[in-house]
Protein backbone atom coordinates (compact mmCIF):
# COMPACT_ATOMS: atom_id res chain seq x y z
CA UNK A 1 0.00 0.00 0.00
CA UNK A 2 2.87 2.36 0.88
CA UNK A 3 4.53 1.64 -2.48
CA UNK A 4 1.28 2.36 -4.35
CA UNK A 5 0.88 5.66 -2.45
CA UNK A 6 4.45 6.67 -3.34
CA UNK A 7 3.88 5.86 -7.03
CA UNK A 8 0.71 7.99 -7.13
CA UNK A 9 2.48 10.87 -5.38
CA UNK A 10 5.42 10.74 -7.81
CA UNK A 11 3.02 10.81 -10.76
CA UNK A 12 1.24 13.88 -9.39
CA UNK A 13 4.55 15.70 -9.02
CA UNK A 14 5.48 15.19 -12.69
CA UNK A 15 5.07 18.37 -14.82
CA UNK A 16 2.08 18.38 -17.12
CA UNK A 17 2.96 18.53 -20.82
CA UNK A 18 1.69 21.64 -22.63
CA UNK A 19 -1.44 21.05 -24.70
CA UNK A 20 -1.04 23.90 -27.19
CA UNK A 21 1.71 25.92 -28.90
CA UNK A 22 0.75 28.96 -26.86
CA UNK A 23 0.90 27.05 -23.58
CA UNK A 24 4.37 25.74 -24.49
CA UNK A 25 5.51 29.23 -25.41
CA UNK A 26 3.97 31.31 -22.65
CA UNK A 27 3.48 28.83 -19.83
CA UNK A 28 0.49 27.79 -17.77
CA UNK A 29 -1.62 30.93 -18.11
CA UNK A 30 -5.36 31.03 -18.73
CA UNK A 31 -5.25 33.10 -21.94
CA UNK A 32 -2.85 30.65 -23.64
CA UNK A 33 -5.08 27.62 -23.01
CA UNK A 34 -8.02 26.31 -24.94
CA UNK A 35 -11.27 27.08 -23.12
CA UNK A 36 -14.04 24.47 -23.16
CA UNK A 37 -17.52 25.84 -22.57
CA UNK A 38 -20.12 23.85 -20.67
CA UNK A 39 -23.53 23.59 -22.29
CA UNK A 40 -26.30 25.21 -20.24
CA UNK A 41 -30.06 25.31 -20.58
CA UNK A 42 -30.38 29.08 -20.34
CA UNK A 43 -28.79 31.46 -22.79
CA UNK A 44 -25.99 33.49 -21.19
CA UNK A 45 -26.71 37.12 -20.47
CA UNK A 46 -25.54 39.37 -23.28
CA UNK A 47 -23.24 42.08 -22.06
CA UNK A 48 -24.25 45.48 -23.37
CA UNK A 49 -21.68 46.80 -25.84
CA UNK A 50 -20.26 50.17 -25.05
CA UNK A 51 -19.37 52.67 -27.76
CA UNK A 52 -16.93 55.52 -27.68
CA UNK A 53 -18.68 58.74 -28.67
CA UNK A 54 -15.37 60.20 -29.82
CA UNK A 55 -14.63 57.11 -31.89
CA UNK A 56 -18.04 57.27 -33.57
CA UNK A 57 -17.58 60.94 -34.45
CA UNK A 58 -14.14 60.32 -35.95
CA UNK A 59 -15.40 57.32 -37.91
CA UNK A 60 -18.32 59.34 -39.31
CA UNK A 61 -16.00 62.20 -40.19
CA UNK A 62 -13.67 59.83 -42.02
CA UNK A 63 -16.55 58.40 -44.07
CA UNK A 64 -17.82 61.92 -44.87
CA UNK A 65 -14.35 63.06 -45.97
CA UNK A 66 -13.81 59.98 -48.14
CA UNK A 67 -17.12 60.55 -49.92
CA UNK A 68 -16.23 64.23 -50.56
CA UNK A 69 -12.76 63.34 -51.85
CA UNK A 70 -14.30 60.94 -54.39
CA UNK A 71 -17.15 63.29 -55.27
CA UNK A 72 -14.97 66.39 -55.81
CA UNK A 73 -11.87 64.61 -57.10
CA UNK A 74 -9.68 66.45 -54.59
CA UNK A 75 -7.41 65.57 -51.65
CA UNK A 76 -8.64 68.28 -49.27
CA UNK A 77 -11.98 69.76 -48.27
CA UNK A 78 -12.94 72.82 -46.24
CA UNK A 79 -15.10 72.36 -43.15
CA UNK A 80 -16.29 74.81 -40.52
CA UNK A 81 -13.26 75.76 -38.48
CA UNK A 82 -10.63 74.00 -40.57
CA UNK A 83 -9.68 71.66 -43.37
CA UNK A 84 -9.49 67.91 -43.88
CA UNK A 85 -6.68 66.59 -46.08
CA UNK A 86 -6.05 63.13 -47.42
CA UNK A 87 -2.61 61.81 -46.53
CA UNK A 88 -1.61 58.94 -48.82
CA UNK A 89 0.52 56.07 -47.54
CA UNK A 90 4.26 56.54 -48.14
CA UNK A 91 5.61 54.83 -51.27
CA UNK A 92 9.07 53.29 -51.59
CA UNK A 93 10.46 54.37 -54.95
CA UNK A 94 13.71 53.57 -56.72
CA UNK A 95 13.89 50.03 -55.29
CA UNK A 96 15.37 47.70 -57.91
CA UNK A 97 14.27 44.08 -57.96
CA UNK A 98 17.19 41.64 -57.95
CA UNK A 99 17.06 38.78 -60.46
CA UNK A 100 19.01 36.26 -58.36
CA UNK A 101 20.32 35.76 -54.84
CA UNK A 102 23.85 36.67 -55.92
CA UNK A 103 22.53 39.82 -57.57
CA UNK A 104 20.64 40.69 -54.36
CA UNK A 105 23.66 39.94 -52.18
CA UNK A 106 25.86 42.38 -54.09
CA UNK A 107 23.52 45.25 -53.21
CA UNK A 108 23.35 44.57 -49.44
CA UNK A 109 25.54 45.89 -46.62
CA UNK A 110 25.34 43.03 -44.13
CA UNK A 111 28.40 40.74 -44.00
CA UNK A 112 28.33 37.78 -46.39
CA UNK A 113 28.37 35.09 -43.67
CA UNK A 114 25.28 36.48 -41.93
CA UNK A 115 23.52 36.92 -45.28
CA UNK A 116 24.18 33.32 -46.32
CA UNK A 117 23.05 32.11 -42.90
CA UNK A 118 19.71 33.92 -43.01
CA UNK A 119 18.83 34.23 -46.71
CA UNK A 120 20.69 31.82 -48.97
CA UNK A 121 18.47 28.76 -48.45
CA UNK A 122 15.20 30.66 -48.93
CA UNK A 123 13.13 30.54 -52.11
CA UNK A 124 11.44 33.63 -53.52
CA UNK A 125 7.66 33.24 -53.43
CA UNK A 126 7.71 30.67 -50.59
CA UNK A 127 8.49 33.14 -47.79
CA UNK A 128 5.43 34.00 -45.68
CA UNK A 129 6.91 36.45 -43.15
CA UNK A 130 9.94 38.72 -43.20
CA UNK A 131 11.05 39.78 -39.70
CA UNK A 132 12.88 43.09 -39.40
CA UNK A 133 15.03 43.24 -36.24
CA UNK A 134 16.91 46.35 -35.10
CA UNK A 135 20.45 45.27 -35.99
CA UNK A 136 22.67 42.22 -36.57
CA UNK A 137 25.44 41.28 -34.17
CA UNK A 138 29.06 40.83 -35.18
CA UNK A 139 30.00 37.32 -36.29
CA UNK A 140 32.42 36.88 -33.39
CA UNK A 141 29.55 37.61 -30.97
CA UNK A 142 27.42 34.68 -32.10
CA UNK A 143 29.67 32.09 -33.77
CA UNK A 144 30.27 30.20 -30.49
CA UNK A 145 26.50 30.06 -29.81
CA UNK A 146 25.64 28.29 -33.06
CA UNK A 147 23.92 24.90 -32.90
CA UNK A 148 21.73 23.40 -35.62
CA UNK A 149 18.56 24.38 -37.44
CA UNK A 150 16.52 27.57 -37.25
CA UNK A 151 18.30 28.92 -34.16
CA UNK A 152 21.41 29.63 -36.28
CA UNK A 153 19.38 31.95 -38.53
CA UNK A 154 18.19 33.91 -35.50
CA UNK A 155 21.52 34.29 -33.69
CA UNK A 156 22.77 37.15 -35.91
CA UNK A 157 19.79 39.20 -34.68
CA UNK A 158 19.42 38.04 -31.06
CA UNK A 159 21.49 36.76 -28.11
CA UNK A 160 21.10 33.01 -27.56
CA UNK A 161 18.38 33.24 -24.86
CA UNK A 162 16.23 35.63 -26.93
CA UNK A 163 16.86 33.59 -30.10
CA UNK A 164 15.56 30.47 -28.31
CA UNK A 165 12.45 32.36 -27.20
CA UNK A 166 11.89 33.82 -30.68
CA UNK A 167 12.18 30.36 -32.24
CA UNK A 168 9.29 29.30 -29.95
CA UNK A 169 7.29 32.30 -31.15
CA UNK A 170 7.85 31.19 -34.74
CA UNK A 171 6.80 27.63 -33.87
CA UNK A 172 3.70 28.97 -32.10
CA UNK A 173 2.75 30.74 -35.34
CA UNK A 174 3.04 27.36 -37.13
CA UNK A 175 5.70 28.75 -39.45
CA UNK A 176 8.19 26.46 -41.12
CA UNK A 177 11.87 27.41 -41.32
CA UNK A 178 11.53 27.89 -45.08
CA UNK A 179 8.69 30.38 -44.59
CA UNK A 180 10.62 33.07 -42.69
CA UNK A 181 13.53 35.40 -43.36
CA UNK A 182 15.24 38.15 -41.36
CA UNK A 183 16.99 41.34 -42.37
CA UNK A 184 18.01 44.20 -40.03
CA UNK A 185 17.01 47.83 -40.34
CA UNK A 186 20.40 49.11 -39.09
CA UNK A 187 24.05 48.13 -39.56
CA UNK A 188 26.70 49.86 -37.45
CA UNK A 189 24.69 53.09 -37.43
CA UNK A 190 23.77 52.87 -41.12
CA UNK A 191 20.08 52.97 -42.06
CA UNK A 192 19.24 49.82 -44.05
CA UNK A 193 15.51 50.41 -44.47
CA UNK A 194 15.80 50.62 -48.27
CA UNK A 195 17.75 47.36 -48.24
CA UNK A 196 14.95 45.79 -46.18
CA UNK A 197 12.51 46.71 -48.94
CA UNK A 198 14.93 45.43 -51.58
CA UNK A 199 15.04 42.05 -49.81
CA UNK A 200 11.22 42.12 -49.58
CA UNK A 201 10.97 42.90 -53.30
CA UNK A 202 13.05 39.80 -54.09
CA UNK A 203 11.49 37.26 -51.70
CA UNK A 204 7.92 38.70 -51.79
CA UNK A 205 6.82 37.87 -48.21
CA UNK A 206 3.11 38.07 -47.43
CA UNK A 207 3.80 40.06 -44.25
CA UNK A 208 6.71 42.22 -43.11
CA UNK A 209 6.93 42.19 -39.30
CA UNK A 210 8.90 45.04 -37.75
CA UNK A 211 10.39 44.19 -34.35
CA UNK A 212 10.63 47.20 -32.05
CA UNK A 213 10.02 50.93 -32.37
CA UNK A 214 13.04 51.85 -34.51
CA UNK A 215 12.35 49.21 -37.17
CA UNK A 216 8.65 50.18 -37.15
CA UNK A 217 9.34 53.90 -37.64
CA UNK A 218 11.78 53.31 -40.50
CA UNK A 219 9.71 50.81 -42.47
CA UNK A 220 6.37 52.58 -41.99
CA UNK A 221 8.10 55.96 -42.55
CA UNK A 222 6.15 57.40 -39.65
CA UNK A 223 6.65 58.24 -35.99
CA UNK A 224 3.58 56.67 -34.37
CA UNK A 225 4.17 55.16 -30.95
CA UNK A 226 4.59 51.39 -31.07
CA UNK A 227 2.10 51.04 -28.21
CA UNK A 228 -0.53 52.56 -30.51
CA UNK A 229 0.20 50.61 -33.72
CA UNK A 230 1.40 47.14 -32.67
CA UNK A 231 -0.59 44.33 -34.24
CA UNK A 232 -2.18 46.65 -36.81
CA UNK A 233 -1.97 46.01 -40.56
CA UNK A 234 -0.47 48.72 -42.78
CA UNK A 235 0.07 48.79 -46.54
CA UNK A 236 3.40 49.97 -47.91
CA UNK A 237 3.95 50.03 -51.66
CA UNK A 238 7.21 49.50 -53.49
CA UNK A 239 6.86 51.40 -56.74
CA UNK A 240 6.57 49.19 -59.84
CA UNK A 241 6.84 46.03 -57.69
CA UNK A 242 3.83 45.70 -55.38
CA UNK A 243 2.20 46.43 -52.04
CA UNK A 244 3.21 44.69 -48.84
CA UNK A 245 1.45 44.26 -45.49
CA UNK A 246 3.52 45.61 -42.59
CA UNK A 247 2.69 44.59 -39.01
CA UNK A 248 4.59 46.14 -36.06
CA UNK A 249 5.41 43.86 -33.12
CA UNK A 250 7.19 44.47 -29.84
CA UNK A 251 10.82 43.33 -29.78
CA UNK A 252 11.25 39.76 -28.41
CA UNK A 253 13.68 41.01 -25.75
CA UNK A 254 10.81 43.05 -24.24
CA UNK A 255 8.23 40.27 -24.62
CA UNK A 256 10.37 37.49 -23.14
CA UNK A 257 10.47 38.83 -19.58
CA UNK A 258 6.99 40.34 -19.25
CA UNK A 259 3.88 38.20 -18.84
CA UNK A 260 1.51 41.01 -19.89
CA UNK A 261 3.58 41.65 -23.02
CA UNK A 262 3.45 37.95 -23.84
CA UNK A 263 -0.33 38.08 -23.86
CA UNK A 264 -0.29 41.18 -26.09
CA UNK A 265 2.21 39.57 -28.47
CA UNK A 266 0.17 36.36 -28.66
CA UNK A 267 -2.93 38.31 -29.69
CA UNK A 268 -0.89 40.15 -32.36
CA UNK A 269 0.58 36.86 -33.58
CA UNK A 270 -2.89 35.31 -33.87
CA UNK A 271 -3.97 38.14 -36.19
CA UNK A 272 -1.07 37.32 -38.50
CA UNK A 273 -1.78 33.59 -38.29
CA UNK A 274 -5.36 34.30 -39.38
CA UNK A 275 -4.07 36.37 -42.31
CA UNK A 276 -1.79 33.48 -43.31
CA UNK A 277 -4.64 30.97 -42.81
CA UNK A 278 -2.71 29.18 -40.09
CA UNK A 279 -5.41 29.68 -37.46
Image (cartoon, helix red, strand yellow):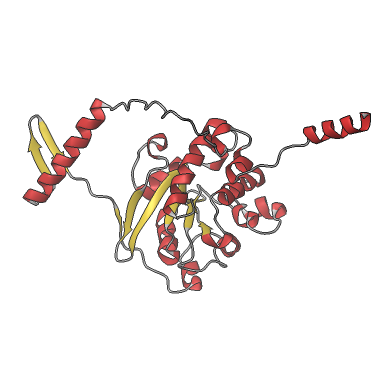
Is 2 rendered above or below residue 273? Answer: above
Q: Quadrant of residue 16?
A: top right
Which residue: 49% across, 54% down? 278
Q: Is residue 93 above or below residue 24?
A: below
- Is residue 36 something one can see in this rendering? yes
Q: How many marks?
A: 0
Where residue 182 appears, as percent x and y from the top left, is: 52, 56
104 or 125: nearer the viewer:
125
Quarter-wise, where is residue 112 in the image? bottom right
User: Does residue 215 show up?
Assistant: no
Q: In the image, is 132 to the left or to the right of 87?
A: right
- In the image, taking residue 250 as reference, residue 172 lies left or right, namely right
Pick whichever, 232 or 218, lies toward us: 232
| Residue placed most toward the observer, 249 or 217 | 249
- x and y percentages locating residue 59 in the rendered image: 22, 36
- Taking the image as shown, residue 22 lies to the left or right of residue 41, namely right
Q: Residue furthest right?
A: 2
Residue 230 screen position, x and y as percent: 42, 40
Residue 266, placed above or below residue 152:
above
219 sits left or right of 266 in the view: left
Quadrant assignment for the N terminus? top right
Q: Position of residue 118 (x, y in %)?
A: 57, 60
Amino acid sequence: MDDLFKQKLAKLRQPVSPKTFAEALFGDVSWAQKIHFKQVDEAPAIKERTFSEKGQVLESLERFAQEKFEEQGTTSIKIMGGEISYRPDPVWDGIEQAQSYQDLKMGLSVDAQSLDLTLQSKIAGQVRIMFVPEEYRKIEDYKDEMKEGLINQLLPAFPAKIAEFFSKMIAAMKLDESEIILYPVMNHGQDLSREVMKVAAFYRPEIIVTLGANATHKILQSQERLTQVHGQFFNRKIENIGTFIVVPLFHPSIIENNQNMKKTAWLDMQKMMKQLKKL
